[in-house]
Amino acid sequence: MVWAAYSPPWLTPTKPCCYWASQTDHPNVVIARQSIDKLLVIKDDYAYCQPCLSPVWDTALAALALQESDKTANAPQLSKAYEWLKSVQLSDEPGDWRVRRPNLAGGGWAFQFANPHYPDVDDTAVVGFAMADSNLPELDESIHRATRWIVGMQSQNGGYGAFDVDNTYYYLNEIPFADHGALLDPPTVDVSARCAMLMARVAKDHDEYLPALKRTIEYIRGDQEADGSWFGRWGTNYIYGTWSALLGLEQTDVPKSDPMYTKAAAWLKSVQREDGGWGEDNLSYHDDKKFRGRYHFSTAFQTAWAVLGLIAAGEVHSQEVKAGIDFLLRSQQADGVWNDPCFTAPGFPKVFYLKYHGYDKFFPLWALARYRNELAKQ
């Protein structure tokens, strides 16, 4: 997502790059340097360059946490967030996805502040679902434009890639210089589950979404691991994939007695740590049998994923959920948030990992609020 996302105009030269390099005041060189400088984070004792920014993704997830916390109290902030998101929704801009779907109307969102060539299905699904969940007015047009685009981006196997359709020419990953074996964008369950989550949520009075939804559910069913978990391509790792699948399934009419739910819940319980939390090492991308769902300490963001997944599976009253909530309460800092000193998602599995600094803030809030709200229903 991050590595493919930024395509500035200076990447299409009208003169040789060596000419630009010798002209430090050339507009293209100036833009390139400014673009890099904006990504630099420089502290007293360390510095790093971010691969890109993620405002659309972070805004949608933060909005979901705030909505679970208190829709009424947070309505002014949520309204501002959705007004901004509406303003950056894409329509008929050119993009690589149009190679496979030239006649499909646009309606997606990109990951960054602006990147019209690369809207992605994952951001689009989570933004559309957050809008639908908000119950705020004047969002229906954006929601259904997004949903129609997602329906049109479905791959033949019923799943969804992040950026493209049927991008499954796996032999290309064998090219020695092929982006670390991650050249392609095949369908994955984490992205597909969020598409199911949106389609199921907005399918009332929109039967045209149901065939795609049915195919997506069957894709999710077929990709569940033997132990009950799901692989997570865009977050670490099987805890993320399992959380994603369960939240998506929860919006559908699949009963909680279905083996998809029961096997997933049993797996999450089996990898809970003694302190009540959950954690998973990025090494699970290298050796999933040894590290799948396991780490040498618990993290707030992965504990929140596991708790949200178990609640979605109907386990709100389980001891495992209560222990996970207790872990989150114990690990909350004096300033009200959490801070996990680890990376949270792969850019390239086995090669390049990212830290989303918001994950250990809004996911624990979301889990705590969901737990409170579910108990209040009893």
Image (tube, helix red, strand yellow):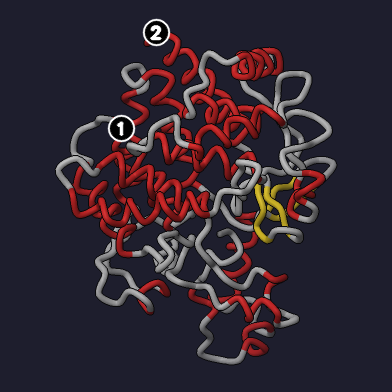
Name the amino acid type tagged 2.
Answer: Gln
> Viewer-proximal residue, 310 or 137?
310
Q: Check disc 1 and report the residue beneath it.
A: 79
Residue 162 is labelled as none
Say which label, 2 or 1, has the lower sequence index.
1
Q: Position of residue 192 (x, y in %)?
A: 45, 53
What secondary structure is marked by label 2?
loop
Residue 96 is drawn in which quadrant?
bottom left
Q: Residue 25, image x and y in percent?
A: 61, 76
Is 318 left or right of 113, judged from the image as shown?
right
Amino acid type at mark 1 = Ser
**Residue neighbourhood size for the residue with mark 1, other residues' Cα within 10 Å, grouped as few (<14), some (14–19), many (≥20):** some
Mark 2 is surrounded, within 10 Å at the Cα level, by few (under 14), some (14 to 19) or many (20 or more) other residues, namely: few
Indicate whether 267 appears above or below 290: above
Residue 193, percent across and down? Answer: 45, 47
The label shown at residue 378 is: 2
Marks 2 and 1, how far apart at CA: 30 Å
Horizontal relation, residue 292 to residue 335: left or right = right
Residue at 26%, 57% in the rendered image: 148
In the rendered image of this protein, does residue 216 appear above or below residue 60?
Answer: below
Q: Quadrant of residue 307?
A: top right
Which quarter shows the C terminus?
A: top left
User: Of tags 2 and 1, which is closer to the observer?
Assistant: 2
Label 2 close to label 1 by CB (< 8 Å):
no
In the rendered image, the vertical position of residue 145 relative to residue 139, given as above or below: below
Q: Is residue 120 visible?
A: yes
For the point 74% across and 54% down, the residue is 285
Nearer to us in this view, 25 or 49: 49
Residue occupying image coordinates x 29% and y 58%: 107
In this orientation, which residue lies closer to the viewer: 346 or 311? 311
